[in-house]
Amino acid sequence: MKKSLYLALGMFILASGFQFGGAQEKAATRTLKVKLKYTGSGTVDEKHKILVFAFDSPEFTQGSVMPFASQSATSKDETVTFSEIAKSPVYVVAVYDPTGGYDGQSGPPPSGSSLGMYTKAPPTPAPVNIDEGKTAEIDLPFDDSAKMP
């Protein structure tokens, strides 16, 4: 089941090329802080970033929803912040490309890229509820066990 979810996520990434959608509108007061903890074998630095994507629907697993925002991290243990989020809940995915060639917008992540998803009951994405005017904080640990096909 977990493998099929990541395969669906991979297919979504391949189909979308991560062209950001306009589902989220500006003028919001919600903030999300995502604490990454990548324990995989890859080197994370300025040339080998972890890209974090935010979605406003769990339907991203079927390839029908585009991310509304992205952030990048240059270390294995880093917190990225999404500001001005219009709607709640949100769903979060992280991608690490060991080749360092993926920028998050020029197409899908290369085969072999590590994938992480915020979940409380794998393989289902967990919603992150954020009250208006508040900041939510989540932990997103991942490793090399789930990869792009």
Image: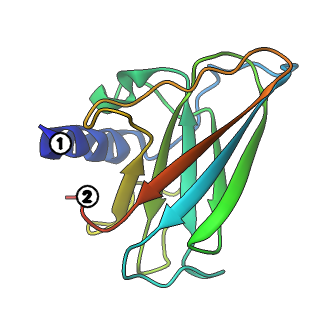
Image quadrant of residue 67? Answer: top right
- Mark 2: secondary structure: loop
Could you say where residue 105 lies in the image, as x and y percent from the top left? Answer: 55, 53
- Give me the residue at 50% from left, 50% from top: 140
Q: In the rendered view, would you say 62 is above or below 140?
A: above
- Circle count: 2
- Give me the residue at 45% from left, 56% from top: 141
Q: Nearer the viewer, residue 138 or 45?
A: 138
Could you say where residue 146 lies in the image, as x and y percent from the top left? Answer: 25, 58
Q: In the rendered view, would you say 44 is above or below 9?
A: below
Q: Is residue 136 left or right of residue 101?
A: right
Local packing at callout 2 (Cα closer than 10 Å; few below 14, some 14-19, many 20+) is: some
Q: Which residue is labeled 1 in the image?
A: 2
Q: Nearer the viewer, residue 149 or 33?
A: 33
The amino acid type found where label 2 is placed reads Ala
Q: Mark yes or no: residue 103 visible.
A: no
The amino acid type found where label 1 is placed reads Lys
Could you say where residue 42 lies in the image, as x and y percent from the top left? Answer: 41, 82
Marks 2 and 1: in contact by CB < 8 Å? yes
Q: CA distance from mark 1 to mark 2?
A: 9 Å
Q: Which residue is labeled 2 in the image?
A: 146
